[in-house]
Amino acid sequence: RQSYIFLSILQQLTTAKKGGRIRVCETGFGAGHSAALFLSASDNVDVITFDKFDRPYQIPAVRFLQESFGTNRIQYIKGNTCNTVPAYFSKEQQNKEILCDFMHASSQCPTDLYDLTTMATVPKVGIITATAMNSLYDKDVYFGSPKAQWLNLRSKGCVTQTTCWKEDSKQLHKSYVFAKNGTKMDHHFCIGINTG
């Protein structure tokens, strides 16, 4: 469901902008599946992706996407997203009116949602999404503690119209960086309107 929803939103944003550029900002490139999905939604979608890029397959995956979709359509920022996202969207960068129409956070940094929501949009309106690998009650990302990012952003009115759902469980048949063979994966997702 997540893929269909993302594609639909990006296509609607492209239509609303009458062919203008749509910028997706994502934290947590992983193997590039989400970035590939975003880029395939429309020729008018560009992606800025933040990750440590410390896995041997990640840079080759970025290069593949650049070759497939164009080097100007995907930019990657290497390093810990807790540092690189705020640095990228610093005051100097905001003066250049960097705009994220669609933000997707799926890294392990406990401040990515906050940083993307409050720093990465000019004007302060866009779509924000996040992936919970385990639970919507994660203490850093969703609703698991008073300091959880999504809960804080929602209570401050920075994120509205929040919808969350759980995908069907899936048992892995081989080991990955994030989980071993036989692990039952329960992915949860939230989507909302970023109002800054």
Image (cartoon, rainbow, N blue to C red):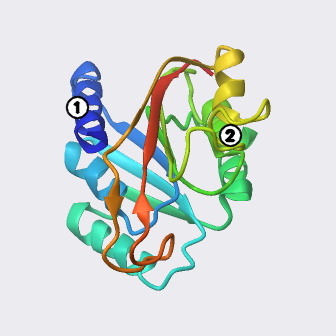
Tag 2 secondary structure = helix
The disc labelled 1 sits on which kind of residue? Ser
What residue do we see at 24% from left, 38% from top? 7
* Above or below 115: residue 195: above
What residue do we see at 65% from left, 46% from top? 112
What residue do we see at 43% from left, 49% from top? 187
Quadrant placement of the C terminus: top right
Residue corresponding to mark 1: 8
Q: Residues within 10 Å of mark 2 (few under 14, many from 20)?
A: some
Taking the image as shown, residue 42 lies to the left or right of residue 56, namely left
**Quarter-of-image position of residue 67:** bottom left
Taking the image as shown, residue 80 lies to the left or right of residue 44, namely right
Residue 137 image offset from top left, x and y in percent: 63, 39
Residue projecting furthest to the right = 147
Residue corresponding to mark 2: 115
Quadrant placement of the N terminus: top left
Residue 183 image offset from top left, x and y in percent: 43, 68
**Quarter-of-image position of residue 107:** bottom right
Dot placed on the residue nearer the N-terminal end, 2 or 1: 1
Q: Between 132 and 73, which is closer to the camera in this rendering? A: 132
